[in-house]
Image (cartoon, grey):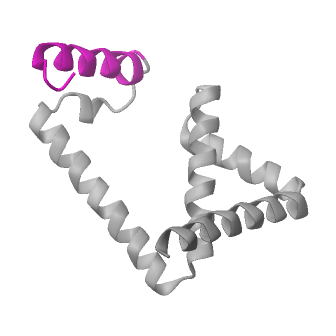
Amino acid sequence: MLENSILNDDFVDMVEEIHIRSRFMGNTFLIKNRESKDRYIESNFKNVLDEILSDTSSLSSEIVLRKLILSYAALSIAQSLRIDLHAATEELYYYMRKKDEETHLELLDSIRHILSKGHKLDN
């Protein structure tokens, strides 16, 4: 779509209509022009990467992976249930507290698996 700027712009407008305008969310973002939106997204993207790298240098890789996995899980729940991310995160943490040992072991196994795959790629 990037090769066809008209189609690309129409797609971006459609996504904004579905995910922002019709749900009355992000109105201050919505009224910005495309360049301002891109600068905002770029700034946030770089900040997230910096935060992850900072966490990695001060915390263990396991803790950083745990944060990333839980963020992804909450996002997936939010998208599938069509609720906001905060509510999805609260629901996820409620579930995890309820099944503390089971979810803890599942997370640890996933983290170990991811890290072991990463070490194989490094060799």
**Residues rendered magenta in the picture:** 1-22
Residue at left offset 81%, top offset 49%: 95
27 relative position to 8: left or right: right
Residue 30 falls in image quadrant: top left
Q: Is residue 38 above or below residue 7?
A: below
Horizontal arrangement in the rendering, residue 98 relative to residue 6 (left or right): right
**Farthest residue, direction bottom:** 58
Q: Which residue is at a point 18% across and 13% down the rendered structure image? A: 7
Q: Residue at x 30, y 63 (%)?
A: 47
Q: Position of residue 77 (x, y in %)?
A: 64, 37
Question: Residue 108's x, y, as percent?
Answer: 75, 67
Residue at left offset 29%, top offset 54%: 44
Give the answer, above or below, for where 79 lies relative to 1: below
Instruction: Point out residue 98 in the picture as x, y percentages from the top left corner.
Output: 88, 54
Residue 5 is a magenta residue: yes
Total tally of numbered discs in the picture: 0
Q: Quadrant of the N terminus?
A: top left
In the rendered image of this protein, does residue 19 appear above or below residue 78? above
Q: Is residue 61 left or right of residue 39?
A: right
Q: Position of residue 53 (x, y in %)?
A: 39, 74
Q: Decide which of 110, 59 is in the foreground and name it.
A: 110
Q: Main secondary structure of the magenta part?
A: helix
Q: Does residue 60 appear to the left or right of 33 in the view shown?
A: right
- The image quarter containing residue 25 is top left
